[in-house]
Image (cartoon, rainbow, N blue to C red):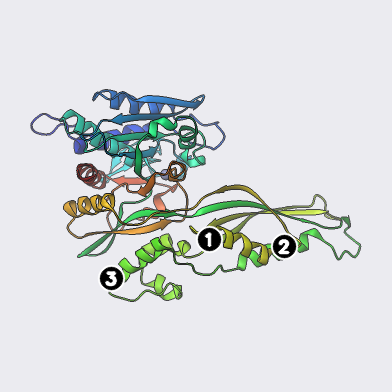
Amino acid sequence: MSESKNGTVTGEDEVVDLCSELIRIDTSNYGDHSGPGERAAAEYVAEKLAEVGLAPEIFESRQGRASTVARIEGEDRSRPALLIHGHLDVVPANADDWTRHPFSGEVADGCVWGRGAVDMKDMDAMTLAVVRDRLRTGRKPPRDIVLAFLADEEAGGVFGARHLVDNHRGLFDGVTEAIGEVGGFSFTVNENLRLYLIETAEKGMHWMRLTVDGTAGHGSMTNKDNAITELCEAVARLGRHEFPVRVTKSVRGFLDELSDAFGVELDPEDMETTLAKLGGVARMIGTTLRNTAAPTMLGAGYKVNVIPGQATAHVDGRFLPGYEEEFLAELDTVLGPRVKRETLHSDKALETGFDGSLVEAMQSALKAEDPIARAVPYMLSGGTDAKSFDDLGIRCFGFAPLQLPPELDFAGMFHGVDERVPVDGLRFGVRVLDRFIDNS
Ligand SMILES: [Zn+2]
């Protein structure tokens, strides 16, 4: 642990060590409880919070699957509380593929390396660093803050956020707004402009199984009712189908800000031209303009000379906020009457406005630390724990502030090989979060 000149440890001093130490605690989530679980990380976090006078509680939803929650008293306890949430689990990593060991937490080339460096032990560490600094120096937040360090986000949050929302709702009493992943990171346009993408919306999901029943029979005989043929035709139609562009308010806001920033008209209906103007951001917003349905698995048959009576396919469907019904109706039209469609798993889409005092607090904190900062709203094509907190009526934003060097492929870091976070980015995030809390 490093110390600043006057002997007091600051959040900026601590954040790198906290991030490294969290990465060294392997919390790989395989989705089936075969991993190490989050208990050790939850205890680590609880200890760091207890050291500065908080009374964290650990909630174990199942053996080894644990989340840590603590409440910080604010100056004005009559105001609604703010939730800051982060997940402790990570997706697995195969060490052979990495330049540095994924659970080393090594600091090299100006970065902290390891699984979770950007998703999202970076934000966990920044939150801990800021909170510890504030409590050590007696700086209360303006209102109550609930801190939640959660299990199981990478497998849908059933044993983390979902468990707490369903079984320990009281922890979130009075909470009206929240920040968490995936937002607040920078995209450098030029030397005069750096965009920070604040997540204000998330797509929803439908994971489906498609089934076609046909007539079973010998492979040598004529068969006009082959389940495989029928299913494949439907799946191919769906795979090639392009859902219409639907511009929701978050995407509209994003495109408007970009139009203004680039000084060009962006036409969502003409995506080829639009995307060409966006460079690295293109990958992030391309799929937030329309619903999507990607065929991902096929199953049928057991012997080369037997026509099976049934064929199945799995489809990963993602819909825009407000377009779930349209999505399902369009799916059925494309698939046709022969296909039976079942939903295996679904989760809702979210969308909130890019306005209000919390958004202003984000904007001013970013601007104070980066004069060329411009906060813009965007929609995440995936999902986060925000979906669970939305059930409690909490307005959720993705805001884990991080300034990134333009050459870093940030989107590629999520669940990618050689995941790493710049040390300067972490320190920047600590300063921004601290200011944000002051203004929140
Ligand atoms: Zn994450």
Regarding ligand 1, which quadrant of the image does it lie in?
Answer: top left
Using the rendered view, name the quadrant where residue 311 is placed. bottom right
Position of residue 282 measured from the top left corner of the image (x, y, whole percent)? 40, 65
Q: Earlier in the sequence, mark 3 or mark 1?
A: 3
Q: Which residue is mark 1?
A: 323
- Distance between the alpha carbons at the discs numbered 3 and 2: 45 Å
Residue at 37% x, 39% y: name it: 86
Position of residue 307 measured from the top left corner of the image (x, y, whole percent)? 84, 56
Is there any visible trace of residue 164 in the rendered image?
yes
| Residue 62 located left or right of residue 17 | right
Amino acid, disc 1: Tyr
Q: Are marks 3 and 2 in contact (CB under 8 Å)?
A: no
- Distance between the alpha carbons at the discs numbered 2 and 1: 26 Å
Residue at 72% x, 53% y: name it: 312
Is the distance from the Cβ of mark 2 to the nearest ligand 1 atom less than 8 Å?
Answer: no
Above/below status of 2 relative to 123: above
Q: Which residue is mark 2?
A: 232
Q: Give the foreground label among 3 and 2.
A: 3
Outermost residue toward the front in this view: 78
Amino acid, disc 3: Asp
Judging depth in this view, the residue of 51 and 77 nearest the camera is 77
Q: Which residue is mark 3?
A: 260
Amino acid, disc 2: Cys
| Residue 360 located left or right of residue 64 | left
- Number of residues whose C-alpha sits closer than 10 Å to that of mark 1, classed few (under 14), some (14–19) or many (20 or more): some
Q: Are marks 3 and 1 in contact (CB under 8 Å)?
A: no
Position of residue 249 measured from the top left corner of the image (x, y, whole percent)? 40, 63
